[in-house]
Amino acid sequence: MVREQGTGERSEVVGVTLEDGRMLSVPLTWFPRLLNATAEQLADYELSAHGIHWDALDEDISVEGLLAGRGDRTRRRNPVV
């Protein structure tokens, strides 16, 4: 389950609670698409057995990746100069 952390201000972390009770939170800086998203965009997610998906943001976070300490693995193209 995804949960917000913090009170009254935009959270700077994404937190999940696993079925076994473990709680993980990672900084949004690990996921630039989420860091730059609006609160409304962040709230529009889907959960699956494998992780969290934000369709409008084209972002997926796997539980496996969180447990391994991996952030965004999207390959970015270098700008053409």
Image (cartoon, rainbow, N blue to C red):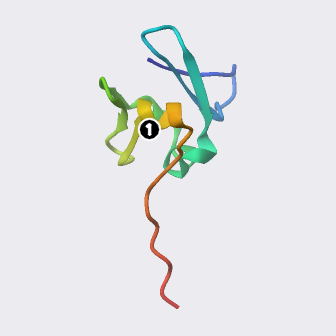
As drawn, 33 above or below 24: below
Secondary structure type for disc 1:
helix
Nearer the observer, 68 or 50: 68
Q: How many marks are shown on the rendered structure? A: 1
Residue under numbered circle 1: 41
Q: Position of residue 42 (x, y in %)?
A: 47, 35
| Quarter assignment of residue 24 | top right
In the rendered image, the residue lying farthest to the bottom is: 81
Nearer the observer, 63 or 41: 63
Q: Quadrant of the N terminus?
A: top left
Q: Residues within 10 Å of mark 1 (few under 14, many from 20)?
A: some
Nearer the observer, 8 or 71: 71
Under mark 1, the amino acid is Gln
Residue drawn at (46%, 67%) of the image = 76
| Quarter assignment of residue 19 | top left
Residue 60 lies left or right of residue 2; in this view the side is left
Residue drawn at (50%, 78%) of the image = 78
Q: Position of residue 62 (x, y in %)?
A: 40, 35
Q: Position of residue 57 (x, y in %)?
A: 39, 47
Nearer the observer, 38 or 74: 74
Q: Position of residue 54 (x, y in %)?
A: 37, 38
Residue drawn at (52%, 36%) of the image = 68
